[in-house]
């Protein structure tokens, strides 16, 4: 999986997104490993909980950034515009 987002406008958002995706992928891979062989120790379950919490924390930071960053808010508003309804002929 490539963790590059060349179209991202905000570098802060881009770095948070990459961190979020890495955390998700790490959690997913470990969860699959344990599911394949079965949990053998309590530590493995604890590790999965820590990885899940790490992902949730990073995802929360990403959402918070998206709501508080002026550049991200501006880009989001532009993305929601209905440009087809804007008439150039008035």
Image (cartoon, grey):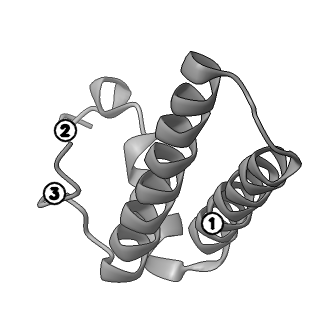
Q: Quadrant of the C terminus?
A: top left
Category of crowding for the residue at label 3, using alpha-carbon neighbours closer than 10 angstroms: few (below 14), some (14–19), many (at least 20): few
Q: Residue furthest left?
A: 6
Q: Is residue 85 left or right of residue 88?
A: right
Q: Is residue 22 above or below residue 71?
A: above
Q: Nearer the viewer, mark 1 or mark 3?
A: 1
Q: Which residue is mark 1?
A: 58
Q: Secondary structure at mark 1?
A: helix
Q: Is residue 15 left or right of residue 4?
A: right
Q: Which residue is mark 3?
A: 7
Q: Are marks 1 and 2 in contact (CB under 8 Å)?
A: no
Task: Name the residue rendered at 16%, 49% in the picture.
Answer: 2
Q: CA distance from mark 1 to mark 3?
A: 21 Å
Q: Position of residue 8 (x, y in %)?
A: 24, 62
Residue 47 marker:
none
The one nearer the camera, 72 or 46, is: 46
Q: Nearer the viewer, mark 1 or mark 2?
A: 1
Q: Nearer the viewer, mark 3 or mark 2?
A: 3
Q: Position of residue 79 (x, y in %)?
A: 39, 44
Q: Position of residue 9 (x, y in %)?
A: 26, 69
Q: Is residue 74 above or below residue 42?
A: below
Query: Of marks 1 and 3, which one's residue comes earlier in the chain?
Result: 3
Q: Secondary structure at mark 3?
A: loop
Q: Quadrant of the N terminus?
A: top left
Query: Of marks 3 and 2, which one's residue comes earlier in the chain?
Result: 3
Q: Is residue 56 above or below residue 68?
A: above
Q: Is residue 82 left or right of residue 53?
A: left
Q: Are marks 1 and 3 in contact (CB under 8 Å)?
A: no
Task: Name the residue rendered at 53%, 66% in the picture.
Answer: 73
Q: Which residue is mark 2?
A: 88
The one nearer the camera, 27 or 74, is: 27
Q: Is residue 46 left or right of residue 90?
A: right
């Amino acid at each position: 999986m490539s963790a590059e987002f060349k179209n991202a406008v905000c570098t802060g958002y881009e770095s948070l997104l990459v961190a979020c995706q890495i955390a998700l992928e790490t959690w997913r891979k470990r969860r699959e490993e344990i599911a394949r062989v079965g949990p053998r120790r309590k530590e493995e379950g604890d590790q999965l909980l820590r990885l899940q919490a790490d992902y949730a924390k990073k995802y929360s930071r990403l959402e918070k950034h998206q709501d508080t960053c002026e550049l991200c808010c501006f880009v989001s508003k532009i993305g929601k515009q209905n440009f087809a309804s804007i008439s150039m002929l008035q």
